[in-house]
């Protein structure tokens, strides 16, 4: 080997010698100048470090698809959630890309298309949407419209031969949900309801722990979701109107308590009881009556013996939490269903732990890529199937019935 020195040893020697003589900054500066001008500073200067290849690293996530291989998505409704969360998330997926936008506001549609590199041919209005049938760049239509429009737009997209990803709640009535499932089945296209929370790393870990039996039998669940409704805000205006929202805080955010209790127990409730705290017609923030219920509390009894106690409200500050009390551990997801910053705290006899898990915004990427994978692999999505969305609507309708009548209401099994 004679005078050869390994690259790593050489770099280390050079830095420490320089630092000892003149301080790291001064050495690095003069060495860089010397290297740049090709002259030797005070004698033979070692060659500068060069970029070097190394074997393929262990990938944390598989490589993303090339643009041509990704499934093309058309987003219908460029409102708050689509613009602020889902369009950015599409760009972080491995299997999806935005290829079309559909909006009632042509100027907004053109601006969003330009920002995301969607060509003019991918800009649609609600009126000319049906020509999307001939758009080979669009595989999936994503419906992000007010709840009462979900059914009609899912059917329209399926008729155009596209797979459909539809926001929660799936629709307003069970009959609408069935029409959506049938329309996609008739067209031979897949349907997924956009339940993001089970793809959120803290919720996913809670599901894993509970399924693995690490906490033992679930005894009780407490789940609360609420936020102040502001009917002056465009995104909240339709939420205060029964004709567009279909339901109140339960349909909008209480659904996270309901669906959460289902995915955490892995069971469907058999009976519900409920109380309206602020029934439909109660005054809203400005004193004007609001068509939909603002506050409701309900319990769900599960066949394995667990009971879930849930609330949802449009008139208190942000709460989005779910706590599972089980035989050997208590799992607190608080917050449970925020877009960012969810936490899981596990309490056992030996103490409390807070596992460090991935960032919560991966939930959006996870649900989008799951649907793309389901389409590619010709299978049902692992979460958010049509029947799952339908069953939530069926349960919510039973919760309203229980609140109206003051009596417990049985929930028929999912069909
Ligand atoms: P938003 O009001 O901000 O957006 C709705 C879009 O629909 C707007 O672009 C609006 O112009 C358009 N629209 C078309 N016809 C309309 C009509 N007749 N009335 C009102 N708007 C009409 O609402 P958003 O918060 O984006 O919610 C849209 C959907 O997404 C809802 O179903 C909601 O439940 C769902 N959502 C889901 C999440 C989630 O975390 N999964 C979060 C927020 C909203």
Image (cartoon, rainbow, N blue to C red):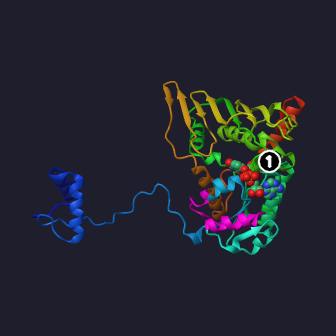
183 or 70: which is nearer to us?
Answer: 70
Residue 109 x/y as whole percent: 71, 65
240 lies left or right of 317? right
Q: Is residue 289 magenta?
A: no
Q: Is residue 101 magenta?
A: yes
The image shows residue 309 at horizontal and vertical percentages of 72, 30
**In the rendered image, the vertical position of residue 72 relative to residue 203, given as above or below:** below
Q: Is residue 125 above or below residue 246?
A: below
User: Can residue 414 be seen here?
Assistant: no
Q: Magenta residues? A: 88-116
Q: Residue at x 63, y 46 (%)?
A: 198
**Mark 1 lies on residue:** 237
Q: Which residue corresponds to the image point at 65% horizontal and 58% vertical from the top-left?
A: 371
Which quadrant of the view contains residue 229?
Answer: top right
Within 8 Å: ligand 1 and the Cβ of disc 1? Answer: yes
Q: Position of residue 18 (x, y in %)?
A: 17, 54
């Amino acid at each position: 080997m004679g005078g050869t020195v390994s690259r790593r040893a050489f770099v280390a020697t050079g830095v420490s010698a320089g630092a000892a003589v003149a301080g790291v900054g001064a050495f690095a500066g003069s060495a860089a100048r010397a290297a740049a001008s090709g002259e030797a500073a005070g004698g033979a200067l070692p060659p500068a470090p060069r970029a070097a290849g190394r074997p393929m690293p262990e990938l944390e996530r598989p490589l993303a698809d090339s643009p041509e291989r990704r499934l093309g998505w058309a987003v219908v409704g460029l409102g708050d959630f689509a613009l602020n969360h889902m369009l950015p998330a599409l760009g972080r997926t491995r299997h999806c890309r935005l290829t079309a936008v559909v909006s009632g506001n042509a100027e907004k549609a053109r601006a969003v298309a330009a920002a995301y590199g969607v060509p003019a041919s991918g800009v649609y209005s609600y009126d000319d949407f049906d020509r999307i049938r001939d758009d080979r760049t669009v595989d999936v239509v994503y419906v992000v419209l007010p709840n009462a429009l979900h059914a009609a737009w899912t059917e329209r997209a399926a008729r155009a031969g596209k797979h459909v990803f539809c926001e929660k709640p799936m629709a307003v009535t069970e009959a609408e949900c069935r029409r959506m499932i049938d329309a996609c089945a008739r067209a031979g296209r897949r349907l997924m309801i956009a339940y993001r929370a089970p793809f959120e790393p803290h919720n996913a870990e809670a599901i894993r722990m509970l399924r693995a039996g690490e906490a033992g039998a679930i005894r009780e669940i407490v789940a609360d979701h609420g936020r102040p409704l502001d009917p002056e805000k465009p995104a909240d205006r339709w939420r205060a109107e029964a004709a567009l929202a279909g339901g109140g805080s339960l349909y909008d955010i209480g659904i996270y308590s309901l669906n959460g209790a289902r995915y955490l127990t892995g069971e469907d409730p058999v009976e519900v009881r409920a109380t309206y705290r602020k029934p439909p017609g109660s005054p809203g923030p400005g004193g004007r009556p609001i068509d939909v219920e603002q506050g409701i509390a309900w319990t769900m009894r599960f066949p394995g013996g667990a009971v879930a106690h849930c609330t949802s409200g449009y008139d208190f500050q942000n709460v989005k939490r779910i706590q599972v009390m089980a035989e050997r551990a208590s799992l607190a997801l608080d917050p449970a269903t925020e877009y960012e910053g969810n936490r899981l705290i596990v309490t056992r006899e030996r103490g409390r732990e807070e596992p460090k898990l991935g960032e919560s915004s991966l939930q959006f990427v996870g649900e989008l890529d799951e649907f793309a994978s389901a389409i590619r692999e010709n299978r049902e999505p692992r979460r958010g199937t049509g029947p799952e969305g339908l069953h939530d609507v069926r349960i919510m309708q039973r919760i309203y019935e229980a609140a109206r009548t003051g009596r417990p209401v049985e929930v028929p099994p999912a069909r």
